[in-house]
Image: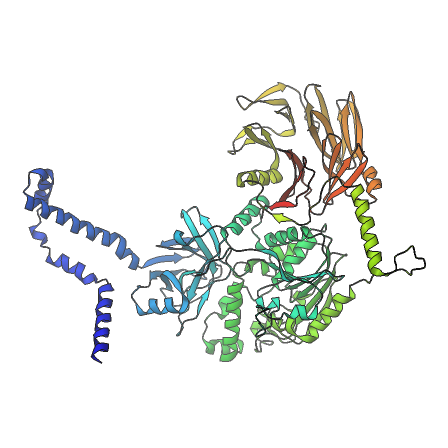
């Protein structure tokens, strides 16, 4: 017993030592007799420091050390416990408290409010309790209203927390998030979904950011087992190839949608049984992983910012849809049935309806798709019910205490889950309007499965809340969407007396889904065998067809084609930005060590300076010199001074486009009527009523790229070198119009509007369809023995020297 008491006494002493006793500092001030301090004496002693006695020197130095310690304490220790204020109103407000940065948008609350922000004392019981319960890292900040009225915001409040650099492992890691604790007893502790990691230039450091609609206690969460984030198409269950299409799952906010069955894990199957595999045993199951709820790493945010620079759109759903479309284009050798839930349905619809060139999708089965938007994430409605008195709610809306608590917790959860995307999900959002303006795909079968039973048991049908939250009216919604919101023109529509989160685990629903997807399959008819010269089994027939295809392909093979595709870094970030600017504004010319951007309003250097302030009618690079046609004449660049010199003084005001052909001193005029072009060389007609694409110089030869043919200037005339109909006759397939052209030796490379890259060997009369929906349509550019193929959101290349299409590509998102 004595031993135990001795141990407890030792622990108390150790604890007392750890405490920082501010009273000792203040007692020092009491002992200092300010009346005895003579400033002039101190200054005089400093001046004559060398002449002072040793004892006086020591005394003066000790005084300075004590004074410096007091200053350090005031500057660094006391502010940690200082309460800061933030006032909200008509203007945006922001405040920084040590590691925390807070941004409140204008009119975030219905009236002006003041909030106090203070860090919890690290030796307090509350701090220690929260750190134990929630694994907080570093300071925890309490934000509370001065008027003691806890209300939700009408607009999202941004909370940023500085990341400790010693725990930042790289741009692909997402091991940070913002965590909050409620004022309940015990507190509810949650990590805010959809956090973002990026470098905030205004703060000069890496931060993690989250949106919230209410204040509480906030801090930083650091994952103790950091892993690199990986997104995109992932294999969930791999099966041997079959006649049945693979399945892609695209989840929404419910991670249970991936279908793992609880308590079925074994040593050989660590994830357990999967409901999708039970219903589709012969199919490989894929899923599309994207950071809907988890923290977005810096690499992801860099891609998103690049997308914003290029398109001007800050829509996460559009951005993710473009990434999904790109992922599908890399799997053109496979067919898929896609099954989606909630927000995932919008991503898939946008990707496929925006990109009709994606041809490997058979069907889309959507569970509770918010095709017309949802009300459960509307902050105005949330403010009406946020932490209101149950008595007032019952008098005003007719809900009893239990119903109100269910509604409040349900809406709070959905607001948190969708905080990063809520604007895009509202019924009148620009994204919802945009996606519903797209055309349904006639080559894809649409199915919609939705519930008619909310996920909470409340009765609001004849109350004022019915107009706010129709998703919770029995018979009209399933807790996530209403029947009307889920409906989609051209889709087969099914309703079930179930909430949204029970649909994809219900046997009756899954049986209908299974039958629908199997009805889409087409059987292969094997012909009757009447002669021994024919194959006698299905296997032999398939082998013969395969062998014939190989022989046919071998005869027309110029390049080796990829067996798989890899997303890798091909361009440096600076080059990416230039490329993005090129797409949006004009053309880029690389003249030895000088890069210029030509737009219709002038010519710019890489620093954004306009070095030729003219309206541009045409531009052409010839023998490493840039020629610009303007309304008042021709300008050429001086490659030594990088200045433009006027070399022709001519009025071109009557033409839409004008190109100057150096050395031969001719002009190409392009004039448009109803979208079609008439093209002249000086006064001589070249073509009329055609689709003009571009004027190119390849190996110092002039080419005109038209939608249906390629023209080359030979001697004093223009002649056709290849036509669209000629290529179609050779490959026995219709193609889109020409988008770009390149030639080297006797090889011709054609880029078409339907995402095809065709190579024609004019010497051996061989044509190869090298790229089909796995290449871009924007531009062909030769550099360092590679022919680069650009699209608006990715780039790939073919190896001209080794005749290989490696399948490497780089996404700009």
Q: Position of residue 109 (x, y in %)?
A: 45, 61
Q: Nearer the viewer, residue 649 or 325?
A: 325
View extreme (left): residue: 53
- Describe residue 238's horizontal placement relative to residue 407 as left or right: right
Residue at 11% in and 41% down: 46
Q: Nearer the viewer, residue 330 or 484?
A: 330
Residue at 60% in and 20% down: 646
Residue at 50% in and 64% down: 416
Instruction: Name the quarter where the N terminus is drawn.
Output: bottom left
* Image quadrant assignment for residue 638: top right
- Describe residue 206's horizontal placement relative to residue 575 as left or right: left
- Describe residue 700's horizontal placement relative to residue 430 as left or right: right
Is any part of residue 765 visible from this angle?
yes
Q: Position of residue 647 (x, y in %)?
A: 62, 18
Q: Position of residue 489 (x, y in %)?
A: 73, 62
Asked if residue 305 is positioned above or below residue 139 in the image, the reply reads above
* Image quadrant assignment for residue 498: bottom right
View extreme (front): residue: 532
């Amino acid at each position: 017993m004595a031993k135990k008491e001795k141990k407890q006494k030792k622990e108390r002493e150790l604890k007392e030592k750890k405490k920082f006793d501010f009273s000792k500092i203040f007692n020092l001030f009491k002992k200092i007799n300010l009346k005895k301090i003579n400033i002039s004496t101190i200054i005089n002693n400093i001046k004559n420091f060398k002449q002072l006695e040793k004892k006086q020197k020591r005394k003066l130095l000790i005084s300075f050390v004590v004074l410096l310690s007091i200053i350090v304490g005031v500057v660094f220790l006391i502010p940690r416990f200082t309460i800061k204020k933030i006032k909200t109103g008509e203007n945006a407000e922001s405040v920084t408290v040590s590691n925390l940065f807070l941004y409140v948008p204008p009119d975030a609350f219905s009236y002006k409010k003041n909030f106090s922000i203070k860090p919890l004392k690290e030796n307090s019981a509350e701090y220690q309790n929260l750190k134990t319960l929630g694994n907080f890292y570093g300071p925890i900040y309490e934000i509370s209203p001065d008027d003691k009225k806890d209300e939700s915001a009408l607009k999202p409040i941004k909370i940023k927390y500085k990341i400790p650099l010693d725990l930042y492992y790289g741009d692909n890691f997402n091991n940070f998030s913002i965590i909050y604790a409620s004022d309940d007893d015990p507190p509810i502790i949650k990590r805010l979904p959809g956090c973002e990691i990026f470098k905030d230039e205004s703060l000069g450091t890496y931060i993690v950011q989250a949106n919230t609609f209410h204040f509480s206690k906030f801090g930083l969460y650091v994952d103790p087992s950091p892993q690199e984030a990986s997104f995109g198409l992932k294999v969930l269950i791999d099966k041997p190839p079959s006649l049945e299409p693979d399945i892609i799952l695209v989840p929404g906010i419910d991670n249970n949608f991936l279908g793992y069955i609880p308590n079925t894990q074994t040593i050989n199957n660590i994830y357990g049984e999967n409901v999708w595999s039970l219903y589709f045993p012969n199919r490989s199951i894929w899923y599309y992983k994207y950071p809907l709820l988890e923290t977005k790493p810096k690499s992801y945010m860099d891609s998103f910012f690049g997308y914003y620079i290029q398109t001007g759109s800050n829509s996460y759903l559009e951005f993710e849809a473009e990434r999904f479309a790109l992922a599908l284009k890399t799997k053109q050798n496979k067919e898929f049935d896609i099954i989606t839930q909630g927000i995932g349905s919008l991503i898939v619809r946008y990707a496929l309806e925006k990109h009709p060139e994606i041809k490997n999708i058979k069907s889309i089965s959507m569970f509770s798709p918010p095709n017309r938007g949802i009300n459960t994430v509307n902050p105005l409605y949330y403010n009406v019910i946020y932490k209101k008195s149950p008595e007032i709610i019952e008098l005003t809306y007719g809900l009893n205490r239990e119903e109100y608590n269910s509604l409040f917790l349900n809406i709070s959860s959905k607001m948190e889950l969708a905080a990063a995307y809520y604007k895009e999900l509202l019924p009148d959002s620009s994204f919802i309007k945009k996606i519903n303006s797209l055309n349904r795909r006639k080559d894809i079968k649409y199915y919609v499965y939705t519930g008619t039973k909310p996920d909470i048991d409340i009765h609001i049908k004849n109350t004022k809340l019915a107009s706010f939250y129709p998703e919770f009216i029995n018979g009209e919604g399933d807790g996530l969407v209403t029947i009307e919101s889920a409906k989609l023109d051209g889709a087969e529509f099914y309703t079930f007396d179930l909430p949204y989160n029970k649909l994809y685990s219900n046997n009756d629903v899954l049986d209908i889904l299974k039958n629908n997807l199997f009805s889409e399959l087409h059987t292969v008819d094997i012909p009757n065998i009447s002669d021994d010269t024919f194959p006698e089994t299905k296997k032999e027939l398939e082998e013969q067809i395969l062998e014939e295809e190989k022989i046919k392909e071998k005869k027309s093979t110029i390049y080796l084609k990829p067996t798989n595709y890899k997303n890798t870094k091909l361009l440096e970030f600076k080059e990416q930005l230039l490329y993005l600017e090129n797409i949006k504004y004009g053309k880029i010319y690389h003249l030895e060590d000088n890069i210029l951007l030509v737009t219709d309003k002038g010519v710019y250097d890489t620093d954004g300076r306009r070095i030729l302030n003219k309206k541009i009618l045409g531009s052409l690079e010839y023998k490493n010199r840039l020629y610009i046609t303007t309304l008042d004449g021709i300008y050429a660049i001086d490659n030594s001074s990088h200045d433009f010199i006027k070399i022709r003084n001519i009025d071109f005001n009557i033409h839409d486009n004008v190109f100057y052909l150096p050395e031969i001193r001719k002009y190409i005029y392009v004039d448009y009527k109803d979208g079609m072009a008439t093209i002249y060389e000086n006064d001589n007609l070249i073509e009329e009523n055609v689709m003009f694409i571009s004027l190119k110089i390849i190996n110092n030869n002039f080419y005109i790229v038209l939608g249906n043919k390629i023209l080359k200037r030979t001697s004093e005339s223009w002649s056709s070198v290849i036509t669209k109909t000629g290529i179609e006759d050779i490959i026995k397939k219709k193609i889109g119009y020409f988008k770009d052209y390149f030639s080297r030796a006797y090889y011709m490379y054609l880029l078409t509007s339907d995402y095809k890259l065709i190579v024609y060997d004019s010497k051996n009369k061989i044509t190869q369809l090298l790229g089909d929906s796995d290449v871009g349509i924007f531009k062909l550019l030769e550099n360092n023995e590679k022919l680069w193929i650009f699209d608006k959101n990715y780039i790939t290349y073919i190896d001209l020297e080794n005749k290989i299409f490696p399948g490497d590509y780089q996404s700009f998102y």
